[in-house]
């Protein structure tokens, strides 16, 4: 039931055609092959992204419970010109680089910082041959969601060798001389909810309760301790209280409407940006499970992995024992993350 996002500390792209130009402050990361007007007028661009060692070390050492976790590299598509099927390749960078302050539109062009020609031994970037890949079919979502668990493990064990990851198109696309193909993603300088990120997930859910389980779709579930605002760095446990919407009559000294019940073990949470309606953390049967004890259901959200000064809506999904799926998308279940 745990998801934690680590945002990039620097990113850029490099260009073979504009080989001495720096793009460190550009709002877009290009992973492209341009074939302009002739077969000799070609350009290959690759993206470089680095994530802070301090955050990787801290989260894995002090936050993740247990040793099992997954790590995904997430980038969000801004624009693309693509073949029907293609693959993005990620490689561990093996040499330090300076992001620089350049942009595509700079006149005169900025040459200080990382470029295609420098600081590399081999033009175009020094990187390990082992590739992390994600393949895309025609109808697939084109955002990058690449499994880099072993790469993050390497950085955790070898923090002084964390120089980030280089992203490129396949050799077949990079060598194409007749057509332009590639992708453009939001960089850390877009100032949106879409910066490059490492998404760490692990399962620390707990489920054991003497409460009676909800079995009918006629139930009410509310977040009983929801606050309107949370500060960056907060780790907050939300209490999810459930009861029958129409409880059976009973001779008792307390209201039957106060008798708590538990939601099934197949209950999950998700988080959506309230303005853009982008799902920031999606339902996951392994990593966003709702826990339960004798007081009721609960789940934890790590606010460090969210963009501040934005509103977020919590969504709950439960699958009943009869197979029926209920999604609770209450517009009142939202909060603001403040600096």
Image: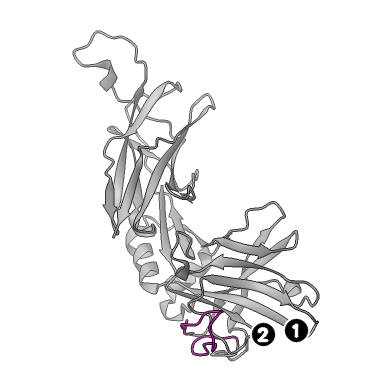
Magenta segment main secondary structure: loop
Label 1 near label 2: C-beta < 8 Å?
yes
Q: Is residue 168 visible?
A: no
| Quarter of the image where the C terminus is located | bottom left
Q: Residue furthest left?
A: 253
In this image, 109 relative to 231: left or right? right
Disc number for residue 105: none
| Residue 96: x %, y % from top left | 48, 85
Image height of 114 relative to 142, above or below: below
Which picture quadrant has residue 173? bottom right
**Residue that mark 1 sits on:** 41
In this image, 299 relative to 50: left or right? left
Q: Is residue 111 magenta?
A: yes
| Residue 217: x %, y % from top left | 46, 23
The residue range painted magenta reads 98-116
Q: Nearer the viewer, residue 109 or 100?
A: 109
Which picture quadrant has residue 331? top left
**Residue that mark 2 sits on:** 17
Element class at badge 1:
loop
Q: Nearer the viewer, residue 93 or 49?
A: 49
């Amino acid at each position: 039931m745990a998801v934690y996002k680590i945002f990039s500390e620097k990113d850029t792209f490099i260009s073979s055609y504009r080989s001495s130009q720096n793009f460190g402050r550009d709002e877009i990361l290009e992973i492209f092959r341009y074939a302009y007007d002739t077969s000799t007028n070609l350009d290959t661009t690759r993206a470089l992204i680095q994530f802070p060692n301090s955050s990787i070390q801290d989260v894995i050492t002090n936050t993740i419970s247990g040793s099992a976790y997954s790590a995904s590299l997430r980038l969000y598509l801004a624009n693309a010109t693509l073949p029907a099927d293609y693959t993005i390749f990620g490689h561990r960078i093996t040499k330090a680089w300076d992001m620089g302050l350049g942009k595509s539109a700079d006149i005169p062009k900025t040459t200080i910082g990382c470029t295609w020609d420098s600081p590399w031994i081999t033009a175009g970037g020094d990187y390990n041959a082992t590739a992390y890949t994600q393949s895309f079919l025609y109808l697939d979502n084109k955002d990058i969601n690449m499994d880099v668990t072993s790469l993050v493990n390497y950085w955790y064990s070898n923090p002084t060798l964390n120089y980030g990851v280089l992203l490129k198109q396949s050799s077949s696309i990079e060598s194409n001389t007749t057509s332009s193909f590639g992708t453009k993603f939001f960089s850390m300088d877009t100032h949106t909810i879409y910066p490059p990120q490492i998404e760490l997930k692990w399962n620390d859910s707990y489920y054991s309760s003497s409460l009676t389980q909800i079995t009918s779709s006629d139930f009410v579930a509310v977040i009983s301790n929801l606050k309107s605002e949370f500060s960056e760095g907060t780790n907050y446990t939300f209490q999810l209280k459930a009861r029958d919407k129409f409880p059976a009559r009973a001779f008792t000294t307390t209201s039957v409407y106060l008798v708590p019940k538990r939601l099934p073990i197949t209950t999950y949470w998700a988080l959506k940006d309230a303005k853009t309606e982008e799902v920031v953390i999606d339902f996951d049967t392994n990593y966003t499970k709702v826990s339960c004890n004798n007081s009721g259901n609960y789940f934890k959200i790590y606010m460090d992995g969210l963009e501040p000064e934005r509103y977020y809506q919590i969504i709950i999904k439960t699958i009943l024992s009869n197979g029926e799926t209920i999604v609770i998308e209450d517009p009142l279940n939202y909060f603001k993350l403040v600096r």
